[in-house]
Amino acid sequence: MASGPLALDEFDHRLLELLQRDAGVTLTALGEAVGLSASAVQRRIKRYRESGFMRTVAVLNPAQLGNVTLATVLVALERESARHHAALHARLRSAPEVQQCYVLAGEWDYLVILATTGLAHTREVAERLFGGDENLKRYETRMVFEPVKQGLALPTRPPTRRKR
């Protein structure tokens, strides 16, 4: 795996944008869209994977499952220390229901996104992850009624400045 950021050219930026929208597009279609041969696209994708820049995962559509309940949990710690953070990180990383977790600045220390199979499961997970932690000042669970936008796409370059 590469130790630093992968150097990206214009072909990479365009190719990665397309792959983030639909990774199932054929190499030929990707090549036509960005102006490269299918074999050149394949070499670039291989480089992304070998360097650890791109992972291959299945992203399921929660609307097709019917039993997915999303919840956000805001977490505030009592004491801030590397040991306390590390313990919470380990617990959150090992929980399959934790879909995402972010360290925050401000009143709350963490935002945790849970994906469960219902309200009872959400309560059980929140109690397991946060209920017995003596270092938690407080946590608040908020149920998601309706996703407005869900995505995993990341920017590969800074935005272009518009001329006035």
Image (spheres, rainbow, N blue to C red):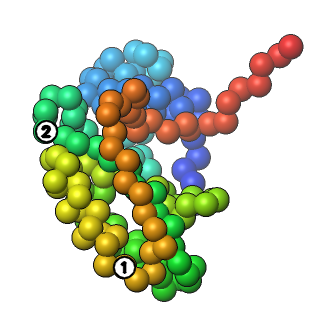
Which dot, 1 or 2, sits closer to the camera?
1
**Residue 101 as seen in the image, left or right of residue 14:** left
- Of the pair 29 and 24, the residue shown nearer to us: 24
> In percent of the image, x 56 and y 38: which residue is there?
156
Identify the residue under disc 2. 67
Q: Position of residue 13 (x, y in %)?
A: 54, 32
Disc 2 residue type (three-letter): Asn
Disc 1 residue type (three-letter): Asp
Identify the residue under disc 1. 133
From where the camera sits, is residue 29 visible? yes
Q: Quadrant of residue 105?
A: bottom right
> In percent of the image, x 43 and y 63: which residue is there?
139
Instruction: Specify the quadrant that holds the C terminus.
Output: top right
**Residue 25 as seen in the image, left or right of residue 159:** left
Q: Residues within 10 Å of mark 2 (few under 14, many from 20)?
A: few
- Of the pair 29 and 71, the residue shown nearer to us: 71
Secondary structure beneath label 1: loop
Q: Residues within 10 Å of mark 1 (few under 14, many from 20)?
A: some
Circles 1 and 2: CB distance less than 8 Å? no
Q: Residue furthest right?
A: 164
Relative to 56, does residue 148 appear above or below in the rendering? above
Q: Position of residue 43 (x, y in %)?
A: 38, 39
- Of the pair 51 and 57, the residue shown nearer to us: 57
Give the spatial CA distance, label 1 vs label 2.
29 Å
Relative to 11, does residue 48 appear above or below in the rendering? below
